[in-house]
Image: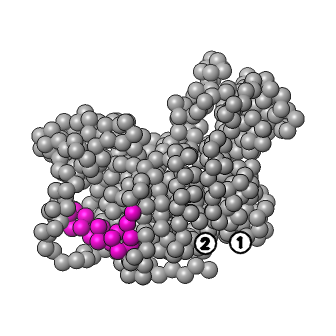
Amino acid sequence: MTTWKKQTLAEILAATADAHAQDEALVISGRRLTYAELRDNVREVAQGLRALGIRRGDHVAVCMGNSLEWVIFFYAAASIGAVTVPVNTRFKADEMLYCLKQADVKLLFVTDRFLKINFIDMLRGICPALERQLPDAALPLLQTVVVLGRDVPAGAIGFAELLSKGAVYAEPWPPAVSTDDVLLMQFTSGTTSHPKGVMLTHDNMLRNATHIAARFNLKAGDHYYSARPFYHVAGTTLSLLAALTTGACLLSSPSFEPEEALSTMWREECTHTSGNDTMFLMMLNHPNFDQYPLKLRNGWASAGPEVSRKVIDRMGMKGLCQAYGLSEASPNVCMSKYDDDIEKRIAGWAHILDDVEVRLVDPESGAVMPPGKSGEIQVRGWSVMQGYYKLPLETAKAITPDGWLHTGDLGIMDEDGRLKFLTRIKDVFRVGGENVAPAEVEDVLHRHPKIKQAQVIGVPDPRLVEVPAAYIILLEGQTATPQEIIAWSKEKLANFRVPRYVQIVDSFEKIGMTGSSKIQKNKLRAQALIDFGLEEQKKT
C-alpha cells in the first residue's frame, strides 16, 4: 500500500530539490533543468506573480505548448496558492474567450506563437484593450497578460518584466497555502459536451501522482518521456507530478510527433513512457521505428488489448500498466501494477487506487452490480474533484449527495477487485437488440494486417435502429477497399458487430481530435452522416 502524507506542491518541490538537487528534473526541446534550478526558477516567477498582485485563490491561465516555462509557471502559481487554468492550444478565439471568462482569470501567461497559431492576434480579436491598457469590457477581470516571445502589445508585459518585478519584491517567503486549496482548474476536453472547469486540489493531484508512480514503478533516476500536453491532467498529474513526487526526470516535447518521440526516448535512454492507443499506433507504425532501439521498461497506456500487446512486444515495455480515469477524479481511478499478471494487464484489468471506492451501477435500474456484470463506474473518495467552477447544478448532477461521482463510463470488475473500463455509455449503440461497444470492434480491426488505426461509431439504420460504421487509416504503402475490410470483418466478428459502412481516411485531424489525441466521437458521428448519406435517416 502506498503511504501518503498531505503536502502542497511547494512542499514536495522543496523536499525533492533538497534530495536530488543536481539531478535533472526536466528535459524539453533540448533544454534542461536540475531540480535545484527548477526550484530557483519557480521562486523567481512566483515572486514576479506576487509583485503583479496575484494572491492565494486567484485564477491564472497559461497558454503555450509543453515547455520549461509552462512547468515553472504552474509550480510558481501553486507556490503562492494561485489556481492554474490550462488553456488548450487548439482552442479557437471563441473557445479561449469562454475559458478565460468562465474561469474568472486575472492573469494570462501566453506564448506569442505556437504551431503556426498567432495567439496575440487571437487575443487582440477578443480583447481589443490589449493594444492599449487592460482590462477590457469582454474580460473585465483580466488585469495582466504576460507574453513569452517578441510580440508584446502595449497593454501586456514581457516575461523578462515579470522576472524583474519579482527580483525587487520584498514580502516574506513562503506564503500560506493549504493542501485543500484548488491547484488546477481543468477544463474538460469537450468530446461529448460543453467544457466545464474541474476544480482539483493539491491533495487530489499530488496523492494521485504518488499512487500511480508506484504502480508503474517510477523512481528517482528514471527517465520518463511523456508528450501528453500539459494542459491536460494526463500531462500534469500523470506526467509532471508523477516525476516531481519521485525525483525522476520528465522529458517532453512541445507537441507530439511520433518520430521525435522515438528519437528522444532512444537518445535519452528513457526507461518509462505513456500514451493512448492513437499515440502508440503512430509510433509503432512509423516507417523509421526500427531505427530507434529503445530501452523502455515500464509505463502506462490507455489502450485496447491488441495495441497493448504490440507495445509490450515491440517497444520492450514488459511492465506496461493499463490506466483508467477522468478529469473529475484527478484523474486516475485505477491502474494495474507493473508486476501484475501480464495477460490481465494486456486485457485491461487494473487495480483501484488505495482508499478510493468504486461501484458499478446499472444505468437504468440504479442497482449495484456484482463482479462479472457491467455497469456505470462510480467513484468516491479523496480523488474526486471539488466540483465544476460556478456550475452548482452540473456539480450536483455529477456527484451524488453521499459523494459518488458519476463517470458516464461502463466498466466491469472481477472477483479480485480489478476494474476494467469498457466504453463511454454515450458511445454504446444498439444494433437490433444487441449492445455494441466501439472499443470491441476497434480492437478486432487493429488485427487486420493493413490497418494502422480504426475508429467505430453507430449510425442510423431504418431496420436495426443503428449499425456500425468504421473510419480506417491504412498502413503506409497499403491499399484496401471498404468492401475488402467488411468481408474480413465478417470472418472475425458477430454479424451485428460487422461495420456496415467503411471510410478510408488519411487522418482524423480534420474530423476532430482533442489535444490529448482522443478522437471526438460526436464529430466523427456527425461526419459519418454526411459521408454515408444518412442525414435524412437521422431526421426520421
Magenta stretch, overall SS: helix
Look at label 2 and name its amino acid.
Asn
Identify which residue, 411 or 433, lies in the foreground.
411
Q: Is residue 27 left or right of residue 490?
A: left
Question: Residue 50, how many percent across, how many down?
Answer: 20, 65
The region drawn magenta spans 32-50
Question: Residue 228, how many percent across, how many down?
Answer: 50, 53
Identify which residue, 366 or 415, lies in the foreground.
415
Tell me: residue 416, above or below residue 114. below
Tell me: residue 439, above or below residue 7. above
Q: Residues within 10 Å of mark 1 (few under 14, many from 20)?
A: some
Q: Which mark is residue 217?
A: 2
Look at label 1 and name its amino acid.
Asp
Query: What secondary structure is marked by label 2?
Result: loop
Q: Tell me the quarter of the picture where residue 34 sits.
A: bottom left
Q: Which residue is mark 1?
A: 339
Identify which residue, 290 or 467, lies in the foreground.
290
Question: What distance separates the C-alpha of mark 2 from that of mark 1?
Answer: 9 Å
Task: Find the residue positioned furthest to the right.
Answer: 491
Picture residue at 38% right of the left edge, 72% below the top: 35
Q: Is residue 419 shown to the viewer in this render?
A: no
Q: Are marks 2 and 1 in contact (CB under 8 Å)?
A: yes
Q: Is residue 38 magenta?
A: yes
Tell me: residue 518, above or below residue 529. below
